[in-house]
């Protein structure tokens, strides 16, 4: 086995644990935001969910036809930059929702 096969094997084995951790973290974040009962929390969670779902929609990115979440790992150039932008939008929406739900109400 060469080095790339070992790294690929580790990535395949670790992926379910990484995904489970991300899902549990997202559920905890959404519950915390909804516990504050603000309209900003509901709108922010829905917008963030749409941005995350956008990461899994197949499209043409540069010369490749792939999903942005996969383009982050296997593509380069325009496809990678487009995928990175989609990820940044999702993270920015999550951060803005967290800030908006914690602002003091009058």
Image: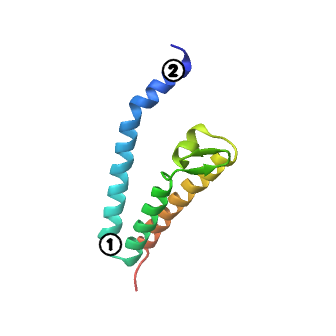
User: Is residue 72 positioned above or below 93 on the image?
Assistant: above
Q: Residue furthest bottom?
A: 106
Residue on which disc 2 sits? 5
| Residue 99 in the image, given as x and y percentages of width and height | 46, 68
| Residue 89 in the image, given as x and y percentages of width and height | 55, 60
Q: Is residue 58 left or right of residue 35?
A: right
- Label 2 sits on a secondary structure element that is helix
The residues tagged by marks 2 and 1 sit, at their Cα atoms, a distance apart of 47 Å
Please report the residue visible at 36 percent of the width from the left and 67 percent of the height from the top. Answer: 33
Q: For marks 2 and 1, give the one nearer the viewer.
A: 2
Give residue 36's mark.
1
Please report the residue visible at 42 percent of the width from the left and 61 percent of the height from the top. Answer: 49
Q: Residue furthest right?
A: 77
Sooner in the amino-acid sequence: mark 2 or mark 1: 2
Q: Nearer the viewer, residue 92 or 105?
A: 92
- Label 1 sits on a secondary structure element that is loop
Give the crowd class for mark 1: few <14, some 14-19, many >=20 residues within 10 Å: few
Please report the residue visible at 43 percent of the width from the left and 69 percent of the height from the top. Answer: 44
Pick the quarter of the image with the C terminus. Answer: bottom left
């Amino acid at each position: 086995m060469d080095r790339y096969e070992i790294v690929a094997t580790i990535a395949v084995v670790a992926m379910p644990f990484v995904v489970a951790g991300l899902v549990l973290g997202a559920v905890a974040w959404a519950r915390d935001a909804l516990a504050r009962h603000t309209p900003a929390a509901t709108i922010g969670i829905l917008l963030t969910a749409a941005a995350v779902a956008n990461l899994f929609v197949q499209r043409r990115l540069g010369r490749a036809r792939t999903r942005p979440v996969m383009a982050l790992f296997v593509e380069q150039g325009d496809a990678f930059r487009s995928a990175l932008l989609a990820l940044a939008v999702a993270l920015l929406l999550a951060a803005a929702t967290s800030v908006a739900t914690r602002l003091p109400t009058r």
